[in-house]
Amino acid sequence: MKFKLDKTLSLVAVGVLSVLQGVQAAPVYEIINIDLDTYNLNGTIDNTRNGYGMAVNANNEAVGAAKGKKKLTVSEDDDGVIDIEDGVADSETINYSVNLPIIANNFTFNSVGNEWMPTFESVNGTTAPTFPEDESTVNSVDTFFYDINDTGLKVGAMTAPQQTIDYDGSSDTQEFWYYREYEQRGFVKSGTDKEIPLVPPFTKYIYKEGEAEEQTITVGGFSSAAAVNAGGLVAGYASTELSDNSANIVKSCVDDNSDTAPQQICIQAAQFPNQYGYSDIQYQIRGYVWQYESGSETLTATMLPLGLEVTNDSVYSAQGLGINDDGVVAGRSYVYRKNDKDRLYYDAAYWTKDTNGEYKYNWVDVDQVKDVYSSIAYDINNEGILVGSYHKYIDGYLRDKFFYYNTNTDELVTPNDFYNNISDLSSRGRDINNKGQVVGYIETTHDKEKPRPKAAFLYDQPTGEFNNVNDLLTCESKGYKKNAEGKWERNLVEVKDGSGKTLTYKSEILVVEGNSINEDGTIVGTAFIRKPSYKFDDDGNLVIGDNGLPFFELNGYGDPVTSFLPRMVVLQPNTTSGAESCTVIDDDGSNDNYERKGAASFAWLLALPLLWFRRRVK
């Protein structure tokens, strides 16, 4: 899909909304991981397409996730010629099938002690992605980092490595069937030590229990580690049993073993997500905490109580997603609102310990807002302020709205964002520090029938100040540089194409999501950076010139067609005397062709760490 992104959308609309709330004494921010020589963001690992900053600790150590290996098809003679950071290439499409090798497309990285340069970090035996593809290092394991505490303890989730069974089906060309032991498992990783898996309570199904044909079938189970506090207490969620319908699917696979495929392959086919991201195998999911102890290879697990009493065979879920240093867990759970059996919802929640040290469930009272369809809590600080979002109709459309909730007073507040009342701009608060600074994202236009662009926000809970982060940036951080007259203008990036011609396009960086903020105000998240698009032929091959360089897609004026790509971004307050946020607005009236390639990947980011949790209710 291609459309025009004119300057009123990319710069003015994103900025004007914030002006409506008046002048605020907000800090000036600068992007730290920008290369001011090339105006490129050092925001993903080599040979991947997208990068996302997930968390930052007090020592300015960050973790992130990279997604999408670059897909460039060139001849053997051209190997090594292409600098794939020059332009935009499609990411490799991964189709899950028991008939094909499992290829990983998600990788973990850190920025620890290396000037914020993303560095690949191996989890569960993974190796860094390569280009051209090195068949000896092809990964079958997907990995994700979600959080890091001040001691460098990292948490996340991973898949199991690929396994094979000799193929004996009807195909003459297939050698193996492919499967893996589990689809997602949380882990804890200290420094450079090997990760410790968080094995869920339920990983095996007992077939015909108590009968002569009894078998123990590995189905893998499901777990994820979403957050970790200063004391090494990890919050997340895990499987406790199979749903009845899923148990019937597994039973059917065992009953029909070898009729069409071995039982492991039949079960794996049901485990793989379909084209819509759903799996036919569904688990009962409960929130969990795990206590990490240095030197131990196992963690003590504690299940968090569900928000209701289970009296039937329906599938209910709960998740721990954030945790403070007192061990208070934020997340969500199914609940009957105010004990009304006709009001079953999936709502924001938090869990606190009683005088006996046992966790108790607490509902976030979204009835203070009215007509909320669902809600979620992402984080809670040491002051007991919880942040999240709720889902409800606003002006005739379902929207998400950022809220904070004071667990000490049971007060829920929906900030007015850019206006003096609640707008219809969807927003989510993702993280809060102990000073009450919240980061997340908010939409920036009021279009009803088409996708709305998003921007990172910074909200100060004590003062109520709400700012678009892009309005707080220095000019260099937005892609400008001073010309000979001392005036700010867009930096022009030069690329040479396959004909030897030098092409130019204008730098542009938009911060679209804040995911984490530490006590010093350092923010880690995601930014869109503008890049030119490579040209491919009808067969999907990169078009290469006689000089060995690629061609780029051009618009009617002979300029490169550009796209926004997501990259990890690191922002810090600029405390230099006289530092100012940039107020420059492009006034050339030009329209840049913009191919919306970053949006789908950004939607993927919003689901983290819920990525593999899209399971159909049966």
Image (cartoon, helix red, strand yellow):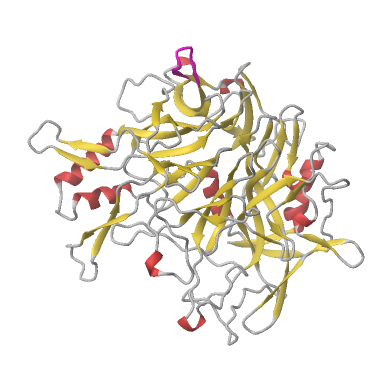
Q: Is residue 528 above or below residue 505?
A: above
Q: Which residues are magenta?
A: 352-360
Q: Is residue 46 above or below residue 399?
A: below
In this view of the protein, can residue 178 be seen by the observer?
A: yes
Specify whether 490 is left or right of 536: right
Q: Residue at x 42, y 34 (%)?
A: 237
Q: Which image quadrant: the C terminus?
A: top left
Q: Is residue 60 above or below residue 498?
A: above
Q: Residue furthest top?
A: 355
Q: Residue furthest right?
A: 485
In this view of the protein, can residue 614 be seen by the observer?
A: no
> Where's residue 51, x and y in %?
57, 55
Q: Residue furthest front?
A: 295
User: Is residue 354 magenta-colored?
Assistant: yes
> Where's residue 371, x and y in %?
56, 26
Q: How many marks?
A: 0
> Where's residue 117, x and y in %?
62, 56
> Where's residue 86, x and y in %?
63, 70
Specify whether 251 is left or right of 199: left
Q: Which image quadrant: the N terminus?
A: bottom right
Specify whether 253 is left or right of 566: left
User: Is residue 280 magenta-colored?
Assistant: no
Q: Residue furthest bottom?
A: 546
The image quadrant that residue 594 belongs to is bottom right
Q: Residue at x 55, y 56 (%)?
A: 119
